[in-house]
Image (cartoon, rainbow, N blue to C red):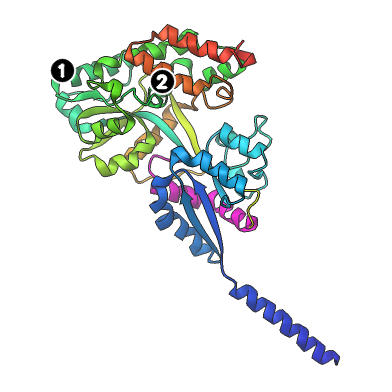
Protein backbone atom coordinates (compact mmCIF):
# COMPACT_ATOMS: atom_id res chain seq x y z
CA UNK A 1 0.00 0.00 0.00
CA UNK A 2 1.40 3.40 -1.01
CA UNK A 3 1.86 6.14 1.56
CA UNK A 4 -0.88 8.14 -0.20
CA UNK A 5 -3.40 5.29 -0.02
CA UNK A 6 -2.44 4.59 3.60
CA UNK A 7 -3.01 8.24 4.52
CA UNK A 8 -6.39 8.20 2.84
CA UNK A 9 -7.33 5.03 4.68
CA UNK A 10 -6.28 6.52 8.06
CA UNK A 11 -8.16 9.71 7.24
CA UNK A 12 -11.19 7.65 6.34
CA UNK A 13 -11.03 5.77 9.63
CA UNK A 14 -10.64 9.00 11.60
CA UNK A 15 -13.55 10.58 9.74
CA UNK A 16 -15.66 7.52 10.41
CA UNK A 17 -14.75 7.76 14.09
CA UNK A 18 -15.69 11.42 14.23
CA UNK A 19 -18.98 10.64 12.58
CA UNK A 20 -19.74 8.02 15.20
CA UNK A 21 -18.94 10.52 17.97
CA UNK A 22 -20.99 13.26 16.42
CA UNK A 23 -23.91 10.95 15.85
CA UNK A 24 -23.70 9.19 19.22
CA UNK A 25 -26.81 9.18 21.35
CA UNK A 26 -26.77 11.71 24.20
CA UNK A 27 -25.77 10.41 27.61
CA UNK A 28 -28.70 10.22 30.04
CA UNK A 29 -28.10 11.05 33.69
CA UNK A 30 -30.51 9.92 36.39
CA UNK A 31 -31.15 11.92 39.57
CA UNK A 32 -32.22 10.07 42.72
CA UNK A 33 -34.38 12.18 45.03
CA UNK A 34 -37.01 12.04 47.77
CA UNK A 35 -38.65 15.21 46.45
CA UNK A 36 -41.45 13.60 44.45
CA UNK A 37 -43.48 16.79 44.85
CA UNK A 38 -40.93 18.52 42.62
CA UNK A 39 -41.14 16.14 39.67
CA UNK A 40 -43.00 18.52 37.36
CA UNK A 41 -40.69 21.43 38.20
CA UNK A 42 -37.55 19.47 37.40
CA UNK A 43 -39.10 17.94 34.28
CA UNK A 44 -40.66 21.11 32.88
CA UNK A 45 -38.39 23.94 34.03
CA UNK A 46 -35.01 22.99 35.47
CA UNK A 47 -33.88 20.12 33.26
CA UNK A 48 -34.95 21.78 29.96
CA UNK A 49 -32.84 24.84 30.88
CA UNK A 50 -29.77 22.64 31.31
CA UNK A 51 -30.39 20.46 28.26
CA UNK A 52 -30.77 23.56 26.09
CA UNK A 53 -27.14 24.40 26.86
CA UNK A 54 -25.96 20.79 26.80
CA UNK A 55 -27.83 18.92 24.06
CA UNK A 56 -25.41 15.99 24.43
CA UNK A 57 -26.57 15.33 28.01
CA UNK A 58 -30.09 14.31 28.94
CA UNK A 59 -31.27 14.27 32.55
CA UNK A 60 -34.02 12.19 34.16
CA UNK A 61 -35.43 13.10 37.59
CA UNK A 62 -36.48 9.86 39.29
CA UNK A 63 -37.83 10.49 42.81
CA UNK A 64 -39.13 7.98 45.31
CA UNK A 65 -41.48 8.62 48.24
CA UNK A 66 -39.77 10.64 51.00
CA UNK A 67 -40.32 7.97 53.65
CA UNK A 68 -38.88 5.28 51.37
CA UNK A 69 -35.96 7.25 49.96
CA UNK A 70 -33.14 6.23 52.28
CA UNK A 71 -33.94 2.52 52.12
CA UNK A 72 -34.59 2.57 48.38
CA UNK A 73 -31.40 4.49 47.66
CA UNK A 74 -29.26 2.17 49.76
CA UNK A 75 -30.77 -0.87 48.05
CA UNK A 76 -30.00 0.60 44.64
CA UNK A 77 -26.47 1.50 45.69
CA UNK A 78 -25.96 -2.05 46.98
CA UNK A 79 -27.25 -3.48 43.71
CA UNK A 80 -25.29 -1.05 41.56
CA UNK A 81 -28.46 0.37 40.00
CA UNK A 82 -28.54 3.81 41.65
CA UNK A 83 -28.64 6.92 39.49
CA UNK A 84 -25.65 9.04 38.56
CA UNK A 85 -26.64 11.91 40.83
CA UNK A 86 -27.80 11.53 44.43
CA UNK A 87 -29.96 14.11 46.18
CA UNK A 88 -28.29 14.54 49.56
CA UNK A 89 -30.05 14.87 52.88
CA UNK A 90 -28.18 17.16 55.29
CA UNK A 91 -25.57 15.87 57.73
CA UNK A 92 -25.23 12.28 58.87
CA UNK A 93 -27.19 10.31 56.26
CA UNK A 94 -25.09 11.74 53.44
CA UNK A 95 -21.90 11.69 55.50
CA UNK A 96 -22.32 7.93 55.86
CA UNK A 97 -22.71 7.61 52.09
CA UNK A 98 -19.44 9.47 51.62
CA UNK A 99 -17.63 7.45 54.27
CA UNK A 100 -18.78 4.23 52.63
CA UNK A 101 -17.40 5.38 49.29
CA UNK A 102 -20.74 5.98 47.61
CA UNK A 103 -20.48 9.74 47.18
CA UNK A 104 -17.50 11.36 45.48
CA UNK A 105 -15.48 14.23 46.96
CA UNK A 106 -16.36 17.46 45.18
CA UNK A 107 -13.79 19.90 46.59
CA UNK A 108 -12.32 20.53 43.15
CA UNK A 109 -15.64 20.91 41.34
CA UNK A 110 -15.92 24.22 39.51
CA UNK A 111 -18.44 26.41 41.31
CA UNK A 112 -17.91 25.12 44.85
CA UNK A 113 -16.28 28.47 45.60
CA UNK A 114 -19.79 29.95 45.28
CA UNK A 115 -20.75 28.53 48.69
CA UNK A 116 -19.67 29.77 52.11
CA UNK A 117 -18.32 27.20 54.61
CA UNK A 118 -21.55 27.35 56.63
CA UNK A 119 -23.54 26.49 53.50
CA UNK A 120 -21.31 23.46 52.87
CA UNK A 121 -21.27 22.29 56.49
CA UNK A 122 -24.25 19.96 56.07
CA UNK A 123 -22.40 18.04 53.36
CA UNK A 124 -18.84 18.14 54.63
CA UNK A 125 -16.80 15.88 56.87
CA UNK A 126 -16.62 16.82 60.55
CA UNK A 127 -13.20 18.42 59.98
CA UNK A 128 -14.60 20.38 56.99
CA UNK A 129 -11.79 19.10 54.76
CA UNK A 130 -14.01 17.31 52.24
CA UNK A 131 -17.33 18.42 50.75
CA UNK A 132 -19.27 15.70 48.94
CA UNK A 133 -22.50 17.39 47.76
CA UNK A 134 -23.25 20.68 46.04
CA UNK A 135 -25.45 22.70 48.44
CA UNK A 136 -28.77 23.54 46.81
CA UNK A 137 -31.23 25.01 49.27
CA UNK A 138 -32.26 25.70 52.82
CA UNK A 139 -35.67 26.13 54.43
CA UNK A 140 -36.58 28.76 57.00
CA UNK A 141 -38.94 28.41 59.96
CA UNK A 142 -41.47 30.96 61.11
CA UNK A 143 -45.24 31.47 61.13
CA UNK A 144 -47.59 31.87 58.16
CA UNK A 145 -50.85 33.66 58.90
CA UNK A 146 -54.19 34.45 57.33
CA UNK A 147 -54.19 38.19 56.59
CA UNK A 148 -57.99 38.38 56.44
CA UNK A 149 -58.30 36.77 59.87
CA UNK A 150 -55.78 39.19 61.34
CA UNK A 151 -57.65 42.14 59.83
CA UNK A 152 -61.01 40.94 61.19
CA UNK A 153 -59.53 40.45 64.64
CA UNK A 154 -57.75 43.80 64.47
CA UNK A 155 -54.32 42.36 65.21
CA UNK A 156 -50.89 42.75 63.66
CA UNK A 157 -48.08 40.22 63.31
CA UNK A 158 -46.49 39.89 66.77
CA UNK A 159 -42.82 40.63 67.36
CA UNK A 160 -42.51 39.62 71.03
CA UNK A 161 -43.52 36.62 73.09
CA UNK A 162 -46.15 38.68 74.92
CA UNK A 163 -47.63 40.01 71.70
CA UNK A 164 -47.73 36.49 70.28
CA UNK A 165 -50.01 35.15 73.00
CA UNK A 166 -52.06 38.35 73.00
CA UNK A 167 -52.73 37.89 69.27
CA UNK A 168 -53.68 34.24 69.79
CA UNK A 169 -56.09 35.22 72.57
CA UNK A 170 -57.78 37.86 70.41
CA UNK A 171 -58.06 35.46 67.46
CA UNK A 172 -59.65 32.90 69.75
CA UNK A 173 -61.96 35.41 71.36
CA UNK A 174 -63.14 37.40 68.35
CA UNK A 175 -63.23 34.83 65.57
CA UNK A 176 -64.55 31.31 65.29
CA UNK A 177 -61.16 30.17 64.07
CA UNK A 178 -58.54 27.93 65.57
CA UNK A 179 -55.65 30.28 66.47
CA UNK A 180 -52.82 27.77 65.83
CA UNK A 181 -52.86 24.95 63.28
CA UNK A 182 -50.68 22.20 64.69
CA UNK A 183 -51.27 18.70 66.01
CA UNK A 184 -49.13 16.38 68.06
CA UNK A 185 -49.97 12.95 66.62
CA UNK A 186 -47.02 12.77 64.22
CA UNK A 187 -44.60 14.28 66.71
CA UNK A 188 -42.04 15.68 64.28
CA UNK A 189 -43.91 18.95 63.80
CA UNK A 190 -43.61 19.68 67.51
CA UNK A 191 -39.84 19.52 67.06
CA UNK A 192 -39.38 21.15 63.63
CA UNK A 193 -42.17 23.73 63.62
CA UNK A 194 -42.45 23.97 67.37
CA UNK A 195 -39.27 23.86 69.42
CA UNK A 196 -36.71 24.30 66.63
CA UNK A 197 -38.76 27.18 65.26
CA UNK A 198 -38.95 29.30 68.42
CA UNK A 199 -35.99 28.11 70.51
CA UNK A 200 -33.05 29.81 68.71
CA UNK A 201 -34.23 33.16 70.12
CA UNK A 202 -33.61 31.78 73.62
CA UNK A 203 -30.35 29.87 73.25
CA UNK A 204 -29.00 32.49 70.83
CA UNK A 205 -28.72 30.45 67.66
CA UNK A 206 -25.28 29.18 66.76
CA UNK A 207 -23.85 30.25 70.12
CA UNK A 208 -26.15 27.88 71.96
CA UNK A 209 -26.01 25.10 69.36
CA UNK A 210 -22.22 25.06 69.34
CA UNK A 211 -22.14 25.13 73.15
CA UNK A 212 -24.24 21.95 73.13
CA UNK A 213 -21.88 20.34 70.63
CA UNK A 214 -18.88 21.24 72.75
CA UNK A 215 -20.52 20.00 75.94
CA UNK A 216 -20.36 23.52 77.39
CA UNK A 217 -24.14 23.76 77.69
CA UNK A 218 -26.81 21.27 78.69
CA UNK A 219 -30.37 20.84 77.53
CA UNK A 220 -31.43 21.39 81.13
CA UNK A 221 -30.00 24.93 81.09
CA UNK A 222 -32.64 27.69 81.25
CA UNK A 223 -32.12 28.83 77.66
CA UNK A 224 -33.08 25.36 76.42
CA UNK A 225 -35.92 24.76 78.89
CA UNK A 226 -37.72 28.07 78.34
CA UNK A 227 -38.84 27.20 74.77
CA UNK A 228 -40.57 24.10 76.18
CA UNK A 229 -42.42 26.33 78.66
CA UNK A 230 -43.67 28.41 75.73
CA UNK A 231 -44.72 25.30 73.79
CA UNK A 232 -46.77 24.19 76.79
CA UNK A 233 -48.68 27.48 76.50
CA UNK A 234 -49.72 26.68 72.93
CA UNK A 235 -52.22 24.03 74.05
CA UNK A 236 -55.26 26.32 74.65
CA UNK A 237 -54.90 27.73 71.14
CA UNK A 238 -54.85 24.44 69.24
CA UNK A 239 -57.87 22.72 67.69
CA UNK A 240 -60.07 20.42 69.73
CA UNK A 241 -58.60 16.94 69.45
CA UNK A 242 -55.17 18.21 68.43
CA UNK A 243 -53.64 15.09 70.00
CA UNK A 244 -55.02 13.06 67.07
CA UNK A 245 -54.32 15.75 64.46
CA UNK A 246 -51.79 14.74 61.78
CA UNK A 247 -49.51 16.93 59.69
CA UNK A 248 -51.86 16.86 56.66
CA UNK A 249 -54.77 17.66 59.01
CA UNK A 250 -52.94 20.81 60.13
CA UNK A 251 -52.18 21.82 56.55
CA UNK A 252 -55.85 21.42 55.61
CA UNK A 253 -57.04 23.24 58.72
CA UNK A 254 -55.04 26.29 57.72
CA UNK A 255 -55.49 26.31 53.94
CA UNK A 256 -59.26 25.81 54.28
CA UNK A 257 -59.36 28.98 56.35
CA UNK A 258 -60.31 27.31 59.62
CA UNK A 259 -57.13 28.30 61.47
CA UNK A 260 -55.40 31.67 61.57
CA UNK A 261 -51.71 30.90 62.18
CA UNK A 262 -49.59 28.02 60.93
CA UNK A 263 -46.23 27.26 62.61
CA UNK A 264 -44.33 26.72 59.41
CA UNK A 265 -41.42 25.64 57.43
CA UNK A 266 -41.00 27.68 54.25
CA UNK A 267 -41.37 24.51 52.19
CA UNK A 268 -45.13 24.93 52.61
CA UNK A 269 -45.25 28.09 50.48
CA UNK A 270 -45.68 26.51 47.05
CA UNK A 271 -48.52 24.20 48.09
CA UNK A 272 -50.22 26.82 50.27
CA UNK A 273 -50.16 29.26 47.35
CA UNK A 274 -52.17 26.74 45.34
CA UNK A 275 -54.60 25.73 48.09
CA UNK A 276 -55.33 28.80 50.22
CA UNK A 277 -58.01 31.16 48.91
CA UNK A 278 -57.03 34.03 51.22
CA UNK A 279 -54.01 36.37 51.34
CA UNK A 280 -51.14 35.13 53.50
CA UNK A 281 -48.37 36.82 55.40
CA UNK A 282 -45.48 35.57 57.52
CA UNK A 283 -43.66 36.63 60.65
CA UNK A 284 -40.48 35.32 62.25
CA UNK A 285 -40.42 33.69 65.70
CA UNK A 286 -41.15 36.43 68.25
CA UNK A 287 -38.35 37.39 70.62
CA UNK A 288 -38.70 37.32 74.41
CA UNK A 289 -38.86 41.10 74.74
CA UNK A 290 -38.67 44.13 72.49
CA UNK A 291 -35.14 44.97 71.39
CA UNK A 292 -33.79 41.42 71.73
CA UNK A 293 -31.67 40.15 68.88
CA UNK A 294 -33.59 37.69 66.72
CA UNK A 295 -32.45 34.29 65.45
CA UNK A 296 -34.03 32.09 62.79
CA UNK A 297 -33.71 28.44 61.87
CA UNK A 298 -32.33 28.61 58.32
CA UNK A 299 -31.73 24.94 57.84
CA UNK A 300 -29.82 23.37 54.93
CA UNK A 301 -32.27 20.97 53.35
CA UNK A 302 -30.84 19.39 50.23
CA UNK A 303 -27.75 19.09 48.08
CA UNK A 304 -26.70 17.01 45.09
CA UNK A 305 -23.81 14.54 44.96
CA UNK A 306 -22.09 12.24 42.49
CA UNK A 307 -22.49 8.47 42.71
CA UNK A 308 -18.94 7.09 42.64
CA UNK A 309 -20.18 4.19 40.49
CA UNK A 310 -21.71 6.44 37.84
CA UNK A 311 -20.61 5.38 34.34
CA UNK A 312 -21.09 9.00 33.26
CA UNK A 313 -19.08 10.83 35.90
CA UNK A 314 -17.72 13.44 33.47
CA UNK A 315 -21.19 14.42 32.29
CA UNK A 316 -22.53 14.32 35.86
CA UNK A 317 -19.85 16.81 36.89
CA UNK A 318 -20.95 19.12 34.07
CA UNK A 319 -24.45 19.01 35.52
CA UNK A 320 -23.18 19.59 39.07
CA UNK A 321 -21.15 22.60 37.90
CA UNK A 322 -24.37 24.03 36.48
CA UNK A 323 -26.18 23.33 39.76
CA UNK A 324 -23.45 25.36 41.50
CA UNK A 325 -24.06 28.33 39.20
CA UNK A 326 -25.96 31.57 39.82
CA UNK A 327 -28.27 30.68 36.93
CA UNK A 328 -29.43 27.51 38.67
CA UNK A 329 -29.80 29.33 42.00
CA UNK A 330 -32.22 31.84 40.48
CA UNK A 331 -34.11 29.23 38.48
CA UNK A 332 -34.51 26.82 41.40
CA UNK A 333 -35.42 29.43 44.02
CA UNK A 334 -38.19 30.87 41.86
CA UNK A 335 -39.46 27.51 40.66
CA UNK A 336 -39.69 26.29 44.25
CA UNK A 337 -40.56 29.30 46.43
CA UNK A 338 -39.68 28.54 50.03
CA UNK A 339 -36.48 26.69 49.15
CA UNK A 340 -33.78 29.30 49.40
CA UNK A 341 -30.55 29.07 47.46
CA UNK A 342 -27.35 28.56 49.45
CA UNK A 343 -25.30 30.12 46.65
CA UNK A 344 -23.52 33.32 47.71
CA UNK A 345 -24.93 35.12 44.67
CA UNK A 346 -28.05 37.13 45.56
CA UNK A 347 -31.28 35.89 44.02
CA UNK A 348 -34.27 38.08 43.17
CA UNK A 349 -37.40 36.19 44.23
CA UNK A 350 -40.80 36.75 42.65
CA UNK A 351 -43.04 35.08 45.23
CA UNK A 352 -44.09 37.69 47.87
CA UNK A 353 -44.37 35.19 50.74
CA UNK A 354 -40.97 33.67 49.97
CA UNK A 355 -39.52 37.19 49.76
CA UNK A 356 -40.92 37.92 53.22
CA UNK A 357 -39.20 34.86 54.67
CA UNK A 358 -35.95 35.77 52.94
CA UNK A 359 -35.90 39.28 54.43
CA UNK A 360 -35.40 37.72 57.87
CA UNK A 361 -31.86 36.70 56.89
CA UNK A 362 -30.90 40.38 56.89
CA UNK A 363 -32.63 41.11 60.21
CA UNK A 364 -31.81 38.01 62.25
CA UNK A 365 -28.90 35.62 62.69
CA UNK A 366 -29.29 32.24 61.04
CA UNK A 367 -28.73 28.91 62.70
CA UNK A 368 -29.47 25.26 61.92
CA UNK A 369 -31.54 22.74 63.85
CA UNK A 370 -29.57 21.80 66.98
CA UNK A 371 -30.11 18.06 66.67
CA UNK A 372 -28.92 17.53 63.10
CA UNK A 373 -25.14 17.79 63.36
CA UNK A 374 -23.51 14.96 65.34
CA UNK A 375 -25.97 15.00 68.27
CA UNK A 376 -28.34 12.41 66.78
CA UNK A 377 -25.71 9.80 65.90
CA UNK A 378 -26.19 7.75 69.04
CA UNK A 379 -28.96 5.93 70.83
CA UNK A 380 -31.30 7.37 71.86
CA UNK A 381 -31.45 9.55 68.76
CA UNK A 382 -31.77 13.12 70.00
CA UNK A 383 -33.92 14.33 67.10
CA UNK A 384 -36.39 11.49 67.57
CA UNK A 385 -36.44 12.17 71.28
CA UNK A 386 -37.41 15.78 70.56
CA UNK A 387 -40.43 14.49 68.63
CA UNK A 388 -41.60 12.52 71.67
CA UNK A 389 -41.00 15.12 74.37
CA UNK A 390 -42.31 18.00 72.24
CA UNK A 391 -45.63 16.21 71.84
CA UNK A 392 -45.63 15.31 75.54
CA UNK A 393 -45.08 18.90 76.64
CA UNK A 394 -47.87 20.26 74.44
CA UNK A 395 -50.22 17.43 75.40
CA UNK A 396 -49.56 18.22 79.04
CA UNK A 397 -48.25 14.76 79.86
CA UNK A 398 -44.67 15.94 80.39
CA UNK A 399 -43.41 19.05 82.14
CA UNK A 400 -40.87 21.25 80.37
CA UNK A 401 -38.30 20.40 83.03
CA UNK A 402 -38.91 16.66 82.71
CA UNK A 403 -38.64 16.92 78.93
CA UNK A 404 -35.26 18.65 79.20
CA UNK A 405 -34.00 16.13 81.74
CA UNK A 406 -34.99 13.20 79.50
CA UNK A 407 -33.20 14.76 76.52
CA UNK A 408 -30.03 15.51 78.47
CA UNK A 409 -29.96 12.06 80.09
CA UNK A 410 -30.29 10.38 76.71
CA UNK A 411 -27.61 12.52 75.11
CA UNK A 412 -25.21 12.09 78.02
CA UNK A 413 -25.57 8.31 77.81
CA UNK A 414 -23.56 8.15 74.58
CA UNK A 415 -22.10 11.57 73.77
CA UNK A 416 -18.89 12.08 75.78
CA UNK A 417 -18.75 15.92 75.61
CA UNK A 418 -22.22 16.01 77.20
CA UNK A 419 -21.19 13.81 80.15
Expressed as whole percent of the image width and height from the top left, the position of residue 294 reads 42, 22
In-front residue for pair 392/224: 392
Q: Is residue 327 visible to the viewer in this orientation of the structure?
A: yes
Q: Residues within 10 Å of mark 1 (few under 14, many from 20)?
A: few
Instruction: Determine which residue is flagged by label 1.
Output: 173
Looking at the image, is mark 1 or mark 2 earlier in the sequence? 1
Expressed as whole percent of the image width and height from the top left, the position of residue 285 reads 37, 23
How far apart marks 1 and 2 lie (CA) works out to 26 Å
Expressed as whole percent of the image width and height from the top left, the position of residue 234 reads 30, 16
Q: Quadrant of the N terminus?
A: bottom right
- Relative to 131, residue 253 above or below: above
- Relative to 2, residue 152 above or below: above
Residue 95 counted in the magenta span: no
Q: Which residues are magenta?
A: 312-341
Instruction: Determine which residue is flagged by label 2.
Output: 195
Q: Secondary structure at mark 2?
A: helix
Residue extending furthest right? 2
Amino acid sequence: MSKHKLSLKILGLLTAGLSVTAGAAPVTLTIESWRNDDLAIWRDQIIPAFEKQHPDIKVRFAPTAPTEYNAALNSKLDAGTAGDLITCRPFDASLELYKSGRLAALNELKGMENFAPVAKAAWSTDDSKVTFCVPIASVIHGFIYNRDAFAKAGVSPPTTEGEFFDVLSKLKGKLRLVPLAMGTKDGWETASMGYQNIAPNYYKGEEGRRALLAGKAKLTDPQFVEPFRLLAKWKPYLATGFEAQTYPDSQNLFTLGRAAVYPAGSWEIASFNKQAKFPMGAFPPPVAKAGDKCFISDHPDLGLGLNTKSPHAAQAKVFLEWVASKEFAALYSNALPGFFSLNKAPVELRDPLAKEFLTWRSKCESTIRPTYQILSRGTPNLENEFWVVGAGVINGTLTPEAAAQRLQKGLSSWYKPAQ
